[in-house]
Image (cartoon, rainbow, N blue to C red):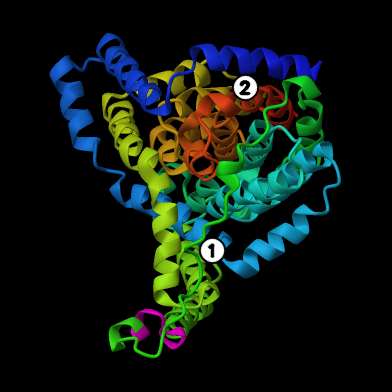
Amino acid sequence: MINAISRFFTGIMHRFLPDPLIFAVILTIITFVLGIALTPKGPVDMIVMWGDGFWNLLKFSMQMALVLVTGHALASSGPVRSGMAGLASVAKSPGQGVMLVSLMSAIACAINWGFGLVVGAMFAREVARRQPKCDYRLLIASAYMGFLTWHGGLSGSIPLVAATKGNPIEGLTGGIIPVSHTLFSGYNIAVTLALIVTLPFLARLMMPKESDVVAVDPKLLAEDTSAGPRKLGPNATLAERLEESRILALVVSGVAFFYLGVRFATRGVVVDVDTVNLAFLAAGMALHKTPMAYARAIGAAAKGTAGILIQFPFYAGIQMMMEQSGLGGLITNAFVEVATKDTFPFLAFLSSGLINFAVPSGGGHWVVQGPFVIPAAKALGVDLGKAAMAIAYGEAWMNMAQPFWALPALAIAGLGVRDIMGYCVTALLFSGLIFGAAMIF
């Protein structure tokens, strides 16, 4: 049955789902039209909001591009490749391969979302090398499905922001929402463990028939022959020796790790996208051994950032229209105003999933939905931690139908969004049962 459902959605996605850039443009148009139709704002107002917000995600876009290139460069180093190859060899069949990828990705994303996105896709490629009869589309989809755990894990942005003094919603809650009420609550631990345990079995059940398997194109798995330090002859210039200096690479790596140690010692062990990127860079520089060897690895990875660079500004514009026009609040209120104390978490979860199509960002969700969900939860006597996690779960859940976060994994894999979304929508339906149960009971 699961296999039939995934085949059905794969067919639908191949026929109707456009390229992620076109998807973002269509969402922009829909948000623009709904803003005019459902709010007091006019066409000029909506255009101004869109233009004002278009570049608001430049920092985040750069962070995501660096997640991709530093993670890719790290994973392409000899020691990491060998480690992933050894772990990938644990899988002795295509079925075990998709299960192993899903398990490792879910665990990695629960630790840190940026780490999980990149490492999951790179690990899927290693499994594909050892299990050539495995459906490559399903392997990459299995890596992306692990992203369902991120908002219940250690890097979940909404629960972490809600627990931070001075966050935009603190005045509405009467204080912070501690992580003991969100990330370390009993229901969230149960949800995260349930996803980690069950997603591998779901991936196994989605395996296509042997006649329908799409094997990996060997060109996608070709080793980069330019990787590694270059041997210098006796007549090498000073400039060439500096470029291939192992001492310089170790100095950069050592200083970066020293800074991270000082930061953790003085500010606490808070792992965010910046610390992950710096750790990736430092480790990659050390493992590639020389500055130019690392630069060549970064250059090979950078070609995969095109989708991030062109699409993220469109989502920044959409987010600004949703926030400033009041459309996001209007959609949220349509759900929460009919809620009771018992149904509120589930309806807030559904509203978050719907908002995620236009605002596929945890931090953006908190800004757009928090001012409406949290006061309503407080008025009804709903646990504020559960209300915050309802927003977080909805965002994580609907990522399976929103290609925004799949871009890094697809760039690493060399696939298109239509190749994996049928499997991801199947995971959306399955995981909705787990998230929904946590919100209802």
Q: In the image shown, does 83 or 256 lie closer to the viewer?
A: 83
Q: Is the residue 178 above or below the residue 132 in the image? A: below
Mark 2 neighbour class, 10 Å CA radius: few under 14, some 14 to 19, many 20 or more = many
Q: Which mark is residue 295?
A: none
Q: Which residue is labeled 1 in the image?
A: 74
Considering every residue shown, the one lying at the far top of the view is 37
Q: Nearer the viewer, mark 2 or mark 1?
A: 1
SS at mark 2?
helix
Give percent across and percent down for residue 350. Answer: 57, 23
For residue 385, say whether it is visible.
Answer: no
Q: Is the residue 121 above or below the residue 359 in the image? A: below
Is residue 411 toward the left or the right of residue 11 in the image? left
Considering every residue shown, the one lying at the far left of the view is 44
Give percent across and percent down for residue 30. Answer: 34, 15
Mark 1 neighbour class, 10 Å CA radius: few under 14, some 14 to 19, many 20 or more = many
Q: In the image shown, does 323 or 78 lie closer to the viewer?
A: 78
What is the chief secondary structure element of the magenta stretch? helix
Is residue 102 toward the left or the right of residue 419 in the image? right
Residue at image position (51%, 18%) is 335
For residue 364, say whether it is visible.
Answer: yes
Query: Which tag, 2 or 1, sits closer to the chain's start?
Result: 1
Residue flagged by tag 2: what amino acid is it? Gly
Residue flagged by tag 1: what amino acid is it? Leu
User: For the magenta stretch, what is the residue range?
Assistant: 241-248
Q: In the image shown, does 270 or 82 lie closer to the viewer?
A: 82
Q: Is the residue 162 above or below the residue 148 in the image? A: below
Q: Is the residue 194 above or below the residue 256 in the image? A: above
Q: Which residue is labeled 2 in the image?
A: 422
Residue at image position (77%, 20%) is 211
